[in-house]
């Protein structure tokens, strides 16, 4: 009986001394850190994830929008340059150039010219009528630029605010870590590491949302600027040909 008790105690001692899986230090899982983060940090992460999703939706939609505008505009400008008269181009139809802002500027100027001449083809406009058509086409060009720039301000807003929102989450997480040190009177790594890790995750998500937004905004702004420069001269060209009766 005593021999069995001694043997059991020896086995227990060996088991306590030997390192096992239960004695391994706990590993930090980023997903678990997010799920068990404090409420302010969770709110920051949710906002930043939403910003990131919206950013990519806008990027894809705006990329398709500008790509179609450039493609249809290139085809329309070839048709415009080879057309003998504005009337001939209008009769060909503009339905195949729906994505082109240049086609809409042309349609605006042509419709106004026909209204002023009461449908009479080849009639020259006087100075006041010519100035009026020029103003109409320039306003149409400005409206098209505004349309091309739609939703770009959202990309700029996300790119400029997401890092600061992530920084707020970082500051709050570090502050929470110091409060835990003070409350537990311990600066051990298991006490501090989870708080700081969740704070840095907020910073990382903020950068993930901000970097694509800034890059996409700059890229689209350059593309819209290129189209805008050509649209201004095109609006003046349409007005000039309208003054001459559409030749």
Image (cartoon, rainbow, N blue to C red):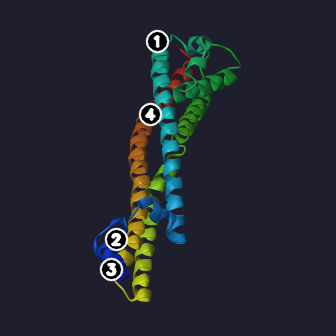
Task: Tell me the SS state at disc 1.
Answer: helix
Q: Name the mark on residue 227.
A: 4
Callout 2–callout 4 Cβ contact below 8 Å: no
Task: Report which residue position mark 2 lands on.
Answer: 23
- Name the mark nearer the viewer: 2 or 3: 3
> Residue 210: percent from the left, percent from the top?
42, 54
> Residue 116: percent from the left, percent from the top?
67, 24
Callout 2–callout 3 Cβ contact below 8 Å: no
Q: CA distance from mark 3 to mark 4?
A: 94 Å
Q: Residue at x 55, y 36 (%)?
A: 144
Q: CA distance from mark 2 to mark 1?
A: 82 Å
Q: Earlier in the sequence, mark 2 or mark 4?
A: 2
- Name the mark nearer the viewer: 4 or 1: 4
* Mark 2: few/some/many CA within 10 Å (<14, 14-19, 20+): few
Q: Earlier in the sequence, mark 4 or mark 1?
A: 1
Q: Name the mark on residue 3.
A: 3
Q: Residue at x 57, y 11 (%)?
A: 88
Task: Report which residue position mark 1 lands on.
Answer: 82
> Residue 28: percent from the left, percent from the top?
38, 65
Q: CA distance from mark 2 to mark 3?
A: 30 Å
- Height in image: 73 above or below 157? above
């Amino acid at each position: 009986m005593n021999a069995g008790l001694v043997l059991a105690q020896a086995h227990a001692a060996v088991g306590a001394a030997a390192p096992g899986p239960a004695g391994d230090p706990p590993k930090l899982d980023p997903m678990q850190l997010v799920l068990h983060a404090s409420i302010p940090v969770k709110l920051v992460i949710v906002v930043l994830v939403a910003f990131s999703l919206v950013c990519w939706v806008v990027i894809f939609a705006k990329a398709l929008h500008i790509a179609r505008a450039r493609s249809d505009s290139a085809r329309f400008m070839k048709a415009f340059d080879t057309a003998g008269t504005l009337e001939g181009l209008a009769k060909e139809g503009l339905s195949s150039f729906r994505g082109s802002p240049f086609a809409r500027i042309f349609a605006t100027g042509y419709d106004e010219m026909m209204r002023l001449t009461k449908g009479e083809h080849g009639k020259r406009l006087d100075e006041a009528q010519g100035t009026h058509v020029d103003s109409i086409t320039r306003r149409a060009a400005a409206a098209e630029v505004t349309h091309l720039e739609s939703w770009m301000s959202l990309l700029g807003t996300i790119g400029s605010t997401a890092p600061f929102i992530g920084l707020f989450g970082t500051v709050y997480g570090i502050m929470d870590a110091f409060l835990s040190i003070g409350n537990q009177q311990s600066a051990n790594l298991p006490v501090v590491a989870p708080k700081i890790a969740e704070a840095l995750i907020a910073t990382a998500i903020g950068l993930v949302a901000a970097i694509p937004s800034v890059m996409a905004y700059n890229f689209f702004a350059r593309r819209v600027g290129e189209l805008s420069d050509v649209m201004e001269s095109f609006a003046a060209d349409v007005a000039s040909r309208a003054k001459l009766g559409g030749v």
